[in-house]
Image (cartoon, grey):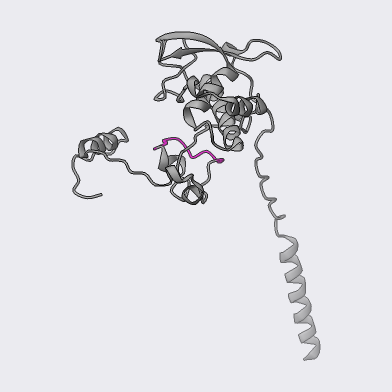
Amino acid sequence: MYRNILKLIAVLVALLFAMTSCKPPAKKPEPIKKPRMELPKIPAKINAGEKKEPILKVYVVQTGKIEKMPLEKYVEGTVAGEIKNDWPIEALKAQAILARTYVLNFVSTKKSKYPGADISTDFEEAQAWNPSNINSKIKEAVKDTRGVVAVYDGKFINAWFHSHAAGQTALAKEGLNYKKAEPPYIVSVKSNDSPDAPANVKHWTATFTKSEVINALKKMGLGINDFKTV
């Protein structure tokens, strides 16, 4: 009886060994794709040559003319148009990097609606531009970040920015009605806009008519013809 039990145990052990030894090798996890660590090239149409500042053909809405403009001069005007010139220097630097990245990405991937121009000062097409607001702080911010851009996977990022996030930043699909796949570098995070905002801009109101709201919703592709409450 005891011998039979030993035989049974031996058979079970042999069977277990055979089963485990016949298992296919464990599948190795697929390596995580890492973004390419390289800088994109300056678009050929604005490239002025090796180690030379790119030159933009900017349609200036204020004059109705196309002006050849060094990249950093354009960046100064956009920083002055998009942010207050007395804000902290680090905020101005961040805006300068975004402005520079924005225009390079625009020129690389889009075409201005103004014939013959690389980009314009039309804020509906690109960025606000107000050279009259350029001061020493803005010049310092642009100079200190000269040539610095934001890049992901070897490409200029979509350098979106906002003035107020209401405590939580939005994804591109939420805040911009972005139709393409959400860029991996866009992440919703908490943002202390209100507590840290200057007192003179901490609280504000805006009023819109019903027709303005409906028209805005229609532009976003929402077929809403009427509403009673918001």
**Dominant secondary structure (helix, strand or loop) of the stretch shown in magenta:** loop
Can the viewer see residue 116?
no
Residue appearing at x 41%, y 43% in the figure? 174
User: Which x, y percent locates residue 204?
Assistant: 36, 44
Instruction: Give left or right: position of 78 versus 25.
Output: left
Frontmost residue, 219 versus 60 = 60
Query: In which image quadrant can residue 138 be found?
Result: top right
Frontmost residue, 69 versus 180 = 69
Q: Is residue 66 magenta?
A: no
Picture mark count: 0
Instruction: Give left or right: position of 150 versus 162.
Output: right
Can the viewer see residue 205?
yes
Residue appearing at x 73%, y 70% in the figure? 16
Frontmost residue, 62 versus 169 = 62
Q: Is residue 76 placed above or below 220 in the rendered structure?
A: above
Residue appearing at x 64%, y 20% in the figure? 41
Q: Is residue 177 placed above or below 128 in the rendered structure?
A: below
The N terminus, quarter of image: bottom right
Q: Is residue 83 placed above or below 3 in the rendered structure?
A: above
Frontmost residue, 3 versus 94 = 94
Which stretch is magenta? 177-185
User: Which x, y percent locates residue 219?
Assistant: 30, 32
Instruction: Give left or right: position of 128 versus 220.
Output: right
